[in-house]
Image: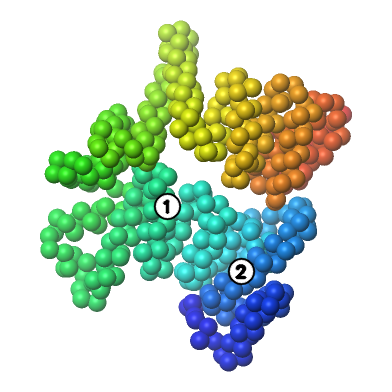
Amino acid sequence: MPEIPVTALDSRQQKLVDNARVALERGQADYALDACAQVLKAAPGCLPVRRLQRVAQLKLFREKNKFMAKAMSGFSTAPFIFGGKKDPTKTLDLAEVFLAKDPTSVSGLKLLAEAAGGLALLETVAFALDAIREIEPENRANLLALGEAWLAAGKPVEALKIVDLMLRSKPADADAQALMRKASIAQTVTKGNWEAKGTFRDKLRDEAQAVSLEQSAKVVTSGEMTQRLLDEAIARVAVEPANLNYYRAVVQGYRQLGRIDEALVWARKARQQPMGAADAGLEKLESELQAVRLDARMKSAEAELAAAPGDTALAENAAAARTELSAWRLTEAKRTVERYPNDFPARQTLGELLLAAGQVDAALAQFQQAQKGPQVRGAALIGLGRGFKAKKLYDLAVSQLMAAKNELGPLDEVKKNVLYELGSCLELMGRREEAMAEFKVIYSEDIGFRDVADKINAFYAG
């Protein structure tokens, strides 16, 4: 099923589209939605109409946001589990039903992407995933899928824009770098119109260059090829020692080979360059590699202890490795917050580490600041609830968790955690009936969440 422009629709359908646009401009979103639905029923591949439909859906949803949030609070997501994967047309119908009720539903948008993929509507796949990006900008799995979707749709420039977003926050992301190489090659092929003139290899001057480009474009490369690309990057550093991108390529190569210590050495070399010291991406990369290094050391020590559980020396070594990793993470988190005081996710991370270390008051102070950041507000309210719970200030904990519960929408993982912590606090206060009411909401949607099934069974058995 090909994607089609509005001009490919019949005259009656084009008239409906025009009417929908006019209606939307006049604030008549309901009419616009009806008109778009009629067109998409006959021509689901008309992406401009789907875009118009989404604008109308979001407009109407925002106008009725409080009502919609309330209406969706008990809405089951079970149909997504059993949705029509074998029939993309039915899957599309199901997606449209859910998005009509809540256009901000990530599950509904995923279903739309799945259906569009089954119908070979490649740009519609990208449209759905891009809508998810607007809702969950930090969802790296979705960003990667979006980049791949743009590439599949023959739009490597759009794919490169997504890659750029990913590499800004995590320069060492191997998947993003692999996508960047594929998109760069696709862009070059498109510009040069290579497919029309012969094979990919025929258009390159050098056979070695062809092999290098082909292997660079693979998400997973063999150890031999990774070593080859690593050697090339080291050679480039020798020629252009101020080019930080070559250092990043070296770090990536060592990391793919599992040689973390050497990767860390090169990350530090990069930071010693004139432009490297102030490079926030390299700073994060060095920190990330150090965390990987200490985590690997801890896991190795724990594996040795598991093989000889009675060995006192090994037990002490494992405990020391765990302590070292925890202390380093806490120190790094404090340093990050000191340097970037308005980085609310960083404050949330620091709060969680402080709480785990038993520094409850310090953790509460961080959560109070973190809740100012919309992207971590829910997690910060949970942190406040847990902190007050640790101090046995259950009434304050309930207050924070109730705020989080009322602000959150559908029952996702964050909201499940809120309800669980709220129920636990109510239970500790002796308000068992109220506690069970919260646990039942989770139980009705996810029977396997933590020990909620045990709690419900024990309540009814008692």
Circle 1 residue: 165
Q: Position of residue 94 (x, y in %)?
A: 65, 66
Amino acid type for the residue under numbered disc 2: Arg
Query: Residue at 62% of width from left, 80% of height from top?
Result: 21
Q: Quadrant of the C terminus?
A: top right
Is residue 233 left or right of 190 when viewed as pictured?
Answer: left
| Res 232 → quadrant | top left
Task: Say which element carries label 2.
Answer: helix
Query: Residue at 46% of width from left, 59% of height from top?
Result: 146
Q: Which mark is residue 134?
A: none
Give the vertical position of 307 relative to 461 (above or below).
above
Q: Nearer the viewer, residue 34 or 26?
A: 26
Is residue 229 left or right of 353 when viewed as pictured?
Answer: left
Circle 2 residue: 54
Is residue 227 left or right of 332 when viewed as pictured?
Answer: left
Q: Nearer the viewer, residue 113 or 308?
A: 113
| Res 241 → quadrant | top left
Give the vertical position of 383 relative to 146 (above or below).
above
Query: Residue at 29% of width from left, 48% of height from top?
Result: 221
Give the vertical position of 22 relative to 145 (above or below).
below
Label 1, label 2: how many angstroms apart (C-alpha)? 24 Å
Q: Position of residue 217 (x, y in %)?
A: 29, 55
The answer to which of marks 1 and 2 sits earlier in the sequence is 2
Q: Position of residue 425 (x, y in %)?
A: 77, 29
Q: Position of residue 186 (x, y in %)?
A: 30, 64
Is residue 283 visible in the rendered image? The answer is yes
Task: Say which element carries label 1.
Answer: helix
| Res 151 → quadrant | bottom left
